[in-house]
Amino acid sequence: MEDAVAIALRQWRQVLPDADLDPIAVIGRLNRCAALLQQATDAPLTRAGVSRAEFDLLCALLRDGGELTPGRLARETFASGAAVTKRIKRLEGVGLVGRRVDGRDRRVAHLSLTEQGRDLIMRLVPEQLEYEAALLSGLPAEHERQLADLLAELLLMLEGRLGGTFG
């Protein structure tokens, strides 16, 4: 049985027989896995009324345990400043995030979870972890660890070459 990338590679070999198609085998599969996993793992979040991007912001605020500026949130979540501003505005509107203006520089905002936001994330994270574990349950534990190690190696290399932030 062939995966979708194997089929595409077979087709590309017919069109470009002399090309090095090995990168497609890795990057194509990573992209396809990421898209499928994103679609699947977003389902519980959607039911809770938050998008993946909003969930990532809320989780960053919880992990930090204090306050973050919008710029720091953008770096933490690999999002543009404009995207973070838009998401924070919505999360403030539904009572999940609070804003405190800096006493020394009124242009700087400090963001934190409200009690409602903390309760939501503390409920969602275990559900999300359970859901994600179920998605990976077909993989033997040793393979999951090996894959995690290989992906960590790839991520470190890419962050070294491309930098750790986007936008």
Image: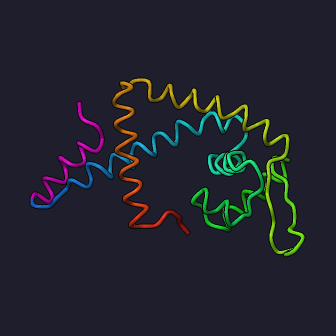
Given residues 12 and 64, the one toward you in this image is 64
Given residues 66 and 29, the one toward you in this image is 66
Q: Position of residue 77 (x, y in %)?
A: 60, 56
Left/right placement of residue 128 relative to residue 70 reads left
Given residues 69 and 53, the one toward you in this image is 69
Given residues 123 and 13, the one toward you in this image is 123
147 vs 101: above or below: above
Left/right placement of residue 97 relative to residue 18 reads right
- Work out which quarter of the rendered image holds the N terminus and state it: top left
Task: Give the mark count.
Answer: 0
107 vs 147: above or below: below
Instruction: Tell me which segment is drawn in magenta.
Output: 1-17
Examine the structure image and report whether residue 147 is included in the region drawn in magenta. Answer: no
The single residue placed furthest to the right in the displayed view is 103
Examine the structure image and report whether residue 3 is included in the region drawn in magenta. Answer: yes
Residue 118, located in which quarter of the rendered image?
A: top right
> Going 62% across and 46% down the picture, which residue do you hit?
52
Q: Position of residue 79 (x, y in %)?
A: 60, 61
